[in-house]
Image: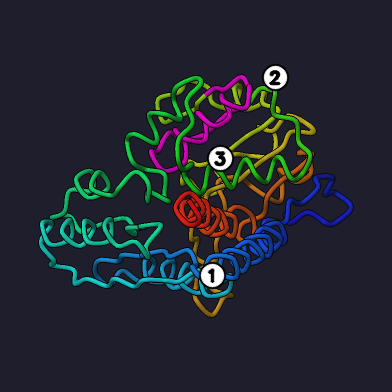
Amino acid sequence: MASSPSDQTAEIIDGKAVAHTIRSEIAVEVRHLSEKHGKVPGLAVVIVGLRKDSQTYVNMKRKACAEVGIKSFDVDLPEDVPEADLITKVHELNSDPQVHGILVQLPLPKHINEENVLGAISIDKDVDGFHPLNIGKLAMKGREPLFLPCTPKGSLELLVRSGIKIKGQRAVVVGRSNIVGLPVSLLLLKADATVTTVHSHTKDPEAIIKEADIVIAAAGQACMIKGDWIKPGAAVIDVGTNAVSDPCRKSGYRLVGDVDFAEASKVAGFITPVPGGVGPMTVAMLLRNTLDGAKRVIGQ
């Protein structure tokens, strides 16, 4: 049963609105760089093949660049491109002074080794934050990575901008992927939270999640986390985007998160919707990382 507004106690964290604010801040800084130094940040977006979802994400990123004044370098390669050719292309972008950030859209076709490609990106241009050196620095106390992965960074930014305390709080991260689960748990640790990771081999995940002041859901399982799994007043950041069939929609499906929103929003103190929560923040953080990369080079 859908909750009526009277049932809903959680404050909705509007990722779209926060991302819009951040993009405006970035646009001002880009304009300042352009006026002062006659240069703008450049982002190379590399896509291999014709995956529909990847194309959608890439177009979104390219459009976002245009909106804030970042120059977008489009690299579209065929599905059957040899790994060596893709790596050569990455090396060319590494040595192009107009490019301050390089993003290779994942997943890559099966014949290409993702680790080899991501490892070839210069650490100074690794705006996705997936280079092992950046992740390694994130994991170490007293070290600062050059870039933080965009979705984890965006998730924490939503907590901070919503005035949610992280220090000393119990945080549970559901999922341990290289892209979200692992780096977001490292970021929370850096922010002095007490962090537990729940994954597919965890016994009694419900009991663990129930103790969390902050829940970051990144498991990729539609509505896996039920309302009664949430501690009253907790902050819930739902990174999941899962398509579930919906005959009432023209597309035949709708997007839902890893959290049962209708139920959880009656219990949580704060919650992000899907869509319109973490998604827009991921793109905003990519732009932020590109700007930061450019600022390290321009005007030095």
Q: CA distance from mark 2 to mark 3?
A: 19 Å
Q: Nearer the viewer, mark 3 or mark 1?
A: 1
Mark 2 or mark 3: name the one nearer the start of the chain: 2
* Residue drawn where x is 78% and y is 31% of the image: 232
**Extreme residue in the bottom direction:** 250
Q: Is residue 175 magenta?
A: yes
Residue 251 horizontal/vertical position (percent): 50, 76
Magenta-tinted stretch:
172-196
* Residue drawn where x is 59% and y is 55% of the image: 281
Q: Which residue is mark 2?
A: 168
Q: Which residue is mark 1?
A: 64
Inspect the image, locate mark 1, and give the three-letter code of the amino acid beneath it.
Ala
Q: Which mark is residue 217?
A: 3
Residue placed most toward the observer, 171 or 188: 188
Q: CA distance from mark 2 to mark 1?
A: 35 Å
Inspect the image, locate mark 3, and give the three-letter code of the amino acid beneath it.
Ala
Tell whether 103 sits left or right of 71.
Answer: left
Q: Quadrant of residue 229?
A: top right
